Image (cartoon, coloured by chain):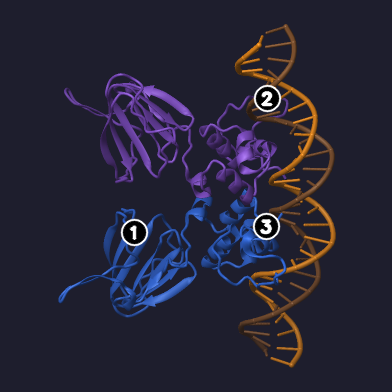
Chain colours: A purple, B blue, C orange, D brown
DNA sequence: ATCTTATGTTTAATATACTAATCATTTCCA
DNA sequence: TGGAAATGATTAGTATATTAAACATAAGAT
């Protein structure tokens, strides 16, 4: 029996070689693919680390087989990520990571006041707000940060090079970010000016 | 290949027929068994609900096979419980559910003040404290309550019949409880007197 | 005591996941 | 342009999970 959770998708008359395209998050395989790509691993590299074959990963990621727990555990150990985190992590495409200045939703508007919300509304969580200052050349390190909770922030001054998972962008004043702290991340000030960020994280980490 | 996550255990010279004994929480199968028992289901009943065979459940619970995700999902759907919750739920035997009055650890002792902590220390979570009054015959219902978070409380007056999962106890003044709200639970005042409970739950539910 | 029923376990047969190898496609470097 | 390297996909064969049925044991009921 083939799992094939999106059986309704096609009469095989259609061209079957859509590259990867439609990011369906349904299915363990799809989740695994996204997580693997976020961590910048190829199927073969993950296969090597996990001690399984790349073919198996390919089949799993296509949702053509349903991996055993032991296999899934091996794979996640190679990332590394816990099974609980794997099933808990929110990977919905609406979970935007980067927000351009103009994209920040405006919460309260007055003639002299403009409040803009970072991320999305209704994430009712207790947060810790920080003011971070990065001197030129500052770097949180190649060994990427990784911890529990969520974090977000707004660049106030200067520019910062932010890496989250496999994505990387340079953000300037007004730009912002929001991501799950579990994703490996790194802050670098590659410019010549001091960079200032207003950030928040939850749960409070110190 | 047998999963056998504790491969270091024996040279097969030893007697291989240790019954099952030692309640090892390690392994998906052991977890499944505990969860199933907490919900008061037999292997056959769960098998019927999930659409798998009781034999398969038996093998899984003995950790002799590693179920596929699709099988595990079917089983958890029959309980019901999400995969994420399954791997997140804390089932360590130190997670005590019922606490007799004398068991409550004393936090602060003075000549006129005695503070006793319900549950364990260092569960630093934001909580909501409630005063609950149950009239004689009151009952939260046969359709057991089930929601996110954790809850605990102390009986101040009268007696309450509390069911949590498959466990049931009648608590009197000074007795207390603490459990994950995900476990199906039910409060009944089977006596003739008003029952009063001081309770807390997290995250705040209203 | 002897049925009956209900429980978990085991076993042979079958369905499925996984491996090892190959194929197909893209990238990129000469 | 062409060849090597790297990536993901596929396929036949093998290992493993799951089924269907029987076995073993215990608890009640009469």
User: Residue at label 1?
Assistant: B123
Q: In the depicted view, which residue is nearer to us: B67 or A81?
A: A81
Please, which chain is the residue tagged with disc 3 on? B
Q: Distance between the residues labelled 3 and 2?
A: 35 Å
Res. B65 mark: 3
Asked where in the image residue B138 lies, by quadrant, the reply is bottom left
Query: Does dot 2 land on a helix, a strand or a loop?
Result: loop
Q: Is residue B155 left or right of residue B180?
A: left
Query: Which residue is identified by label 2?
Result: A17
Residue A82: x %, y % from top left? 51, 48
How packed is label 1: few (under 14 Cα within 10 Å), some, or many (20 or more)?
few
- Residue at 30%, 37% in the rendered image: A200
Does B70 sit above or below residue C5? above
Q: Residue A119 falls in which quadrant of the image?
A: top left
Horizontal relation, residue A17 to residue A117: left or right: right
Q: Distance between the residues labelled 1 and 3?
A: 35 Å
Work out whether C5 lies above or below A112.
Answer: below
A98 left or right of B10 in image: left
Q: Name the residue at 35% across, 79% down.
A: B191
Q: Look at 26% across and 38% down and name the residue there.
A: A129
């Amino acid at each position: 029996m083939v799992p094939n959770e999106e059986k309704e998708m096609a009469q095989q008359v259609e061209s079957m070689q859509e590259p990867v395209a439609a990011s369906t998050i349904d299915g363990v395989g799809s989740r695994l693919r996204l997580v693997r790509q976020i961590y910048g691993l190829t199927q073969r590299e993950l296969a090597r680390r996990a001690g399984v074959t790349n073919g198996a990963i390919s089949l799993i990621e296509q949702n053509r087989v349903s991996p055993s727990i032991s296999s899934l555990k091996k794979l996640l150990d190679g990332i590394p990520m816990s099974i609980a985190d794997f099933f808990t992590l929110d990977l919905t495409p609406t979970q935007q990571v980067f927000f351009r200045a103009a994209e920040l939703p405006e919460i309260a508007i007055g003639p002299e006041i403009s409040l803009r919300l970072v991320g999305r509304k209704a994430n009712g969580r207790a947060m810790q707000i920080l003011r971070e200052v990065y001197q030129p050349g500052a770097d949180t390190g190649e060994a990427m940060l990784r911890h529990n909770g969520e974090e977000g922030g707004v660049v106030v001054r200067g520019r910062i090079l932010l890496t989250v998972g496999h994505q990387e962008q340079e953000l300037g004043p007004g730009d912002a970010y929001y991501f799950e702290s579990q994703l490996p991340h790194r802050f670098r000030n590659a410019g010549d000016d001091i960079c200032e960020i207003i950030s928040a994280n939850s749960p409070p980490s110190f």
